[in-house]
Amino acid sequence: MDGAFVEPDIEVMSAALDAEAEALADRGGSLAWGIFRRGGPERAVNADVPYRIASMTKSFTAAAIGLLAAEGLDLDRPFGTLLPELAGTAVADRSCRQALTMGTGFTKDDPWADRMEAMAPEELVAWLRRGAIACAPADTGYEYSNLGFALLGMVAEAVTGRAFTEIVSAAILAPLGLSRTGFDHRDFPDLAPGFRIDQDGCLHPAELTGPGVFSPIGGVISTVRDIGDWMHTHLDALDRIDSYAPGSWSRVLADNQQAHRFIEVQTSEFHTESLHYGFGLDHRFDTRFGRVICHSGGYPGYGSHMRWLPELGLSIVVLGNTTYYPAQRVVGDALDLGWAAATGRAETRLHRVTTSAPVPRWPAAGEQIDTVLTAANLVTDFDEAIADEIFSMNMDLDEPRTERRQRFAKWARAHGLEAGRAFSVAELTMSSPLRGTVTVPADEAQTGPATITVGLNHLGQVQAITLGG
């Protein structure tokens, strides 16, 4: 270990994760976690209980594509060439490499895409032919997009003539002995049940979806122990980086862990951390720990995060069973506490300042501006007919209309907004063609600036309305 890097206190980290597990259990959920040391004992809780790992799946998708690239798949060929049925669509000129590195220019689409797992490939093609909207030109910045990974799965199936789930199972899961990892919830009768938490803290069972064209974005089910082995396999690949052969398994996994697309820099009084996206994995460099490789996952009923520190031979995974459980924050907090204890700063809490890479985006069209403003106005004047017209299918699945209306009304009252108060274009800022924020003036909101942020999916339908302040 390089003396410049600090090994966090494992006891403190374990205590922090235990506290998070207890807090989730108090709400009715469950947490599985593991801390693994190369050549040392592990710490793990619920290590053999399967959970949906959501977007951590992307590391398996990237590995499968890497193996196909080693066999001749050209990552820079346009999707429209690899998949002729996509010719003439907005994604036709994008490539596998751009999808792997989140450089397609298509927007963050989690709420919508997370409900699309079972969609058939021909349905996605028909959907794209309706006119998908890009937020930016390709390769001009980082735009997290599930759509790109769904297309990677279609490419894998076209190249091999096999189902994507079969490719991953045969080429990755079976050889590595990941026997408690798969795609179909029917194969896991002991799957930890997923829950949605409503505004009153009550739990509601989350719907389970089956494999389909969006499985490559987040369809994997796994356990802490299997993910521990998956992380160790990546660490082993980095160990052999000077000796692997082109196209070998180690070469594929080592390449996936490299920094490809810059995201942001985080700084505090005590550290600096740069963030990039690799191939299905986040790559960070933390001045406290050295390299950090990770990925999070969020899905209806689940939230997850895995992270490994090559210079320290340390890896951590957290799996929770509530919708978008904040596993990344939990792992980050545990590492911060472990670092603080190891450096004699037990009372120190890191306050990060984030500087994101600039991303040039297309201007919003009038139709998109109108939709965002119409959605924002639902907060103070909910109209069922309008919601029917502009809501994407995920909206009512994510939160039933009755609960949504109650939450909107409660928020409006808390910020002193009268029923029927209409927002104007002057109060709206569009950060991309598919994302806009209404800011309520501080004097009107009473408690300070309040915000309503509306996200649209690739067709310009409302996929999220987030209230802030």
Image (tube, rainbow, N blue to C red):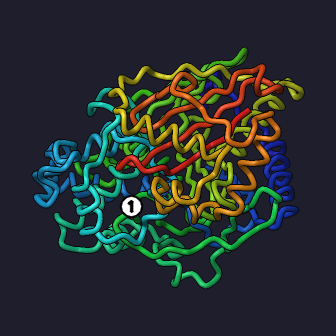
Counting every numbered tag in the picture gives 1
> Which residue is painted at 63% across and 54% down in the image?
324
Give 217 or 89, whichever is nearer the viewer. Answer: 89
**Vertical arrangement, residue 21 with respect to residue 174, above or below:** above
Question: Is residue 134 found left or right of 33 in the rendered image?
Answer: left
Residue 19 visible somewhere in the drawing: yes
Label 1 Cα neighbours within 10 Å, binned few <14 / some 14-19 / many ≥20:
many
Question: What amino acid type is highlighted by mark number 1?
Answer: Pro
Question: Is residue 436 found left or right of 4 in the rendered image?
Answer: left
Give 333 or 431, whichever is nearer the viewer. Answer: 431
**Residue 315, percent across and down?**
62, 48
Give 469 or 333, whichever is nearer the viewer. Answer: 469
Q: Quadrant of residue 196?
A: bottom right
**Residue 199, percent across and down?**
78, 56
**Vertical arrangement, residue 270 with respect to residue 163, above or below:** above
State the residue position of label 1: 216
Question: Is residue 120 found left or right of 237 in the rendered image?
Answer: left
Question: Is residue 201 found left or right of 228 in the rendered image?
Answer: right
> Which residue is painted at 77% across and 28% down in the image?
445
Disc 1 on helix, strand or loop? helix
> Which residue is painted at 58% across and 40% down in the image?
376
> Which residue is painted at 68% across and 41% down in the image?
420
**Vertical arrangement, residue 437 with respect to residue 406, above or below:** above
The N terminus appears in which quarter of the rendering? top right
**Residue 298, percent across and down?**
57, 54
